[in-house]
Image (cartoon, rainbow, N blue to C red):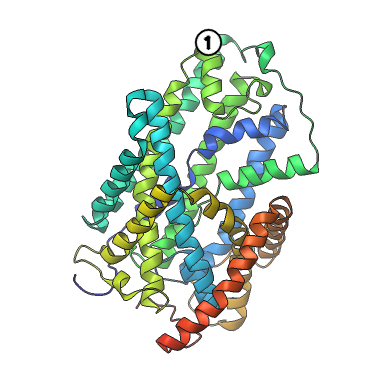
Amino acid sequence: MAGQSLQRLLGKGFSIAACVGLVIGLGIMRTPGEIALVFNDPVSYMALWIGCGAFVLVSLLVVAELIAMTPRSGGLYAMVAHAYGRYPGFLIGWTDWVANCASVALKAVVLLEYFAMLVPSVAPHQTVIALLVTTSFAILQLGGTQLGGGIQKFASFGIGLIMIALAAALYYGFFVNGGAVAAPEEYRAVASPGFAAVGLVIAAVVYTYDGWYAASYFGEEVKSGGRAVAMGSIQGALIIIALYLTLNLAIVLSVPLSALAGHDLALAGALDLVFGAGTGTVIIVAAVFILLAHHNLQYMIVSRILYSLSTDGLGTRRATSVTDKGTPAGAVILSWVMIVLLIVVGHFEFLLNLVAILFMVMYVALIAGVFRLRKQEPDAERPFRAWGFPATGIICGLGWTAIALFVGMTNPTSALSGLVLTLVSWPVYRWLKRRRHLDENIATQSP
């Protein structure tokens, strides 16, 4: 292994690709069906997508200040540690690493479930093939940062083309059919919106936009520095919003929303209605491609989280080794071991549920972190300054607080688990701090 530092091998284009690649997933294929259970009219449906997209974009325009002035890889860990110190960083960093490992494990299993729909003969061997797939992506990472970055740019471009192709197909169906197709009687649904139902739908749309901070995981590896990471994130978010709105407008024009209510893969349902039964199979193919793309990016992410934690004394020294091609190889291998264990044991969904509330709280912390650093580091270099601040910070802070409270109330198990995890993490952190002789603050520059 050569050296102990990551290298600036990625361009701003990768920042855009990371944002697009992490955000666009299976959520956009399922969420329309969840929304249609509550909002059956096109105006409120589109207003929801527009409003949530605007909220996420404004949140990013605030947090981009923190992204730009934290020129380290590690994403949420690096930003939280910069704004609040070592222990909050420790809590969020390990939570983020475990959550992303669990996400990779879940997607490996779901990937094979979808693939088995296309090739039923693989069904008896799903676990073994899932292990082979995830191992292959781990090995790819060892080929170097530029290889992983190049794969991601290609994959994100492919994901964008999939969204455009699906929208174009539905627009074509709209013009050929002279409007929306009629909903079969068995598909008709009666909406019964209440506070809880509306809240769940809003949370679902916000989750579908989640991942807008993806480029921050590579802060010290982007050639042009922190501003390029922030601007790439914003440009990526704008692309995602445009793709989502284009696709959802195509849905409401071509298919009655009541026909999609509760559909597990609403996009597949829309294609089946417009072009005939079986057409929606193309969504399975698209889902397989997207899940493969997520594997590449999330291996890059988990290795950066573990590397950054470890270089700050909060992980293992084995995770600090970096190859001459810029790959944190030790962190890749250790993350692969964790993912393999999760696939074999099968507790990834529990882990994702456990950390859900901590992520909602973390979004509030990121917004508050901009306020905190404005006060504590007023003269620090800010390559990007929060747009419309402090008004936007207050609005977004209140919005994320409301979402966090709602998630906590509707998912008390996650809230309780998050509290227990926080209480347990404190003595672990104190023991580690004494053992490693760590001070409370962490350098904001890359080591």
- Is residue 387 visible in the rendered structure shown here? no
426 w.r.t. 100: above or below? below
Of residues 403 and 244, the one drawn nearer to the viewer in this rendering: 403
Q: Quadrant of residue 317?
A: bottom left
Q: Position of residue 354 (x, y in %)?
A: 58, 57
Q: Position of residue 399 (x, y in %)?
A: 70, 56
Q: Quadrant of residue 315?
A: bottom left
Of residues 345 and 429, the one drawn nearer to the viewer in this rendering: 345
- Position of 395 with respect to 351 (left or right) is right
440 w.r.t. 217: above or below? below
163 w.r.t. 409: above or below? above
- Position of 320 with respect to 188 (left or right) is left
Q: Position of residue 316 (x, y in %)?
A: 35, 74
Of residues 430 and 327, the one drawn nearer to the viewer in this rendering: 430
Q: How many marks?
A: 1
The disc labelled 1 sits on which kind of residue? Val
Tell me the residue at 48%/50% (across/down).
Answer: 348
Q: Quadrant of residue 179?
A: top right
Tell me the residue at 39%/79% (across/down).
Answer: 313
Residue labelled with disc 1: 176
- Is residue 41 visible in the rendered structure shown here? yes
Of residues 113 and 395, the one drawn nearer to the viewer in this rendering: 113
- Position of 148 with respect to 232 (left or right) is left
How packed is label 1: few (under 14 Cα within 10 Å), some, or many (20 or more)? few
69 w.r.t. 132: above or below? below
Tell me the residue at 25%/68% (across/down).
Answer: 322
> SS of the residue at dot 1?
helix
- Position of 139 with respect to 88 (left or right) is left
| Quarter the C terminus occupies | bottom left
Tell me the residue at 80%/43% (across/down).
Answer: 195
